Amino acid sequence: MKRFFFGLALIIGTSLGIKAADGDFFPYPKPPEELTNLADRCDFLVGRFWAGMDFKGGLSKMDKFSSTFNDWVSFMPYAHADTVHAAIDRILTRVSKSGPQTLALARMAEAYTYSDTAEIFSEEIYYPFAKAAANHKKISGADRARFQSQVQIMDNTRQGSVVGHLDFVTPQQEKKSLDDVRTQMVVILFNDHDCDDCALARVRLSADINATALIRAGVLSVLCIEPGEASTEWLAAAATYPSDWIIGASENADEYFALRTSPSIYLLDSRHKLLAKDVTIDGLLAALAALRQNAGL
């Protein structure tokens, strides 16, 4: 919370300075007073943030640098996308010859924008850092492989892209695939059988009159997928799931989808083009209400 108010002070133009644990790290830029628009002020901060930074010396003080990096990232959601992309490209270019420095930036970006505990979750911000680490020949194979896997998942699940394969086994031990499902809209509900939030999502979706009407009309398919093996416990739970859903367990789901939370909900069209991901249950029910209205059901 303290860092939030510090960032807010920078945006609105107070004269606060940043203090590292044992003194000043480097002076942050202060937006000029004539910039009164929030996006313009954040553009100034994001674009000029590292102007006073000695990268060679700064990256040797990793704790301080990490905290400063977090401050920089915190302004990005309020800045224009082209400014953010250009600023990220500049910092990656500055460290591009160093495998350790590129890896350090990628790890910080992951912690602050892609991890389960990220305060600002953003694949758009994280992607160039992950890709830089994935492609860097001076980063070890194990580290590169992890970032390569993340990049592949993000590529496969970009909004507007066609989702890749999803193979699963049904409670009847039939092998099925996402390719077998072709309705106007497809909901993939990744969930764990012993997760309370997942149980609530299943109850709300199964009780939704719009979802029921769309399924009966052949407009909607609901895939309820357990990420993992078809365990005995899952089979027992799956027996209680709605009979008009497609139920399955997929051991390789996390190779194609970013499943950071449970439940994790994806919306696809009839060609399996990704319409939305990480949808809340409230957002899903609103989308189904709109779809039913548009379908005249």
Image (spheres, grey):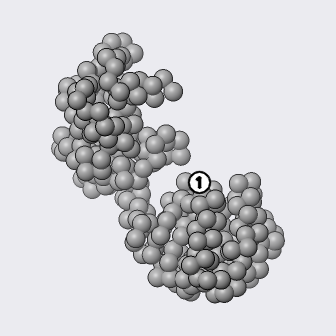
Label 1 neighbour load within 10 Å: few <14, some 14-19, many 20+: few
- At a point 34% along the width and 20% down the height, the residue shown is 14
Q: Position of residue 115 (x, y in %)?
A: 49, 46
- At a point 37% along the width and 49% down the height, the residue shown is 126
Camera-side residue of 15 and 162: 15
Q: Which residue is mark 1?
A: 261
Q: Position of residue 120 (x, y in %)?
A: 46, 43
Q: Position of residue 8 (x, y in %)?
A: 41, 28
42 on left or right of 154 = left
134 on left or right of 172 = left
17 on left or right of 287 = left
Q: Quadrant of residue 236?
A: bottom right
Q: Is residue 240 visible?
A: yes
Camera-side residue of 70 and 186: 186
Q: Position of residue 112 (x, y in %)?
A: 43, 40
Q: Quadrant of residue 230?
A: bottom right
The type of residue carrying mark 1 is Thr
Q: Is residue 139 visible?
A: no
- At a point 81% along the width and 71% down the height, the residue shown is 240
Q: Quadrant of residue 192?
A: bottom right
Q: Secondary structure at mark 1?
A: loop
Camera-side residue of 193 and 123: 123
Q: Is residue 119 above or below residue 229?
A: above
Camera-side residue of 162 and 206: 206
Give the total of numbered labels: 1
Point out the image quarter for the C terminus. bottom right
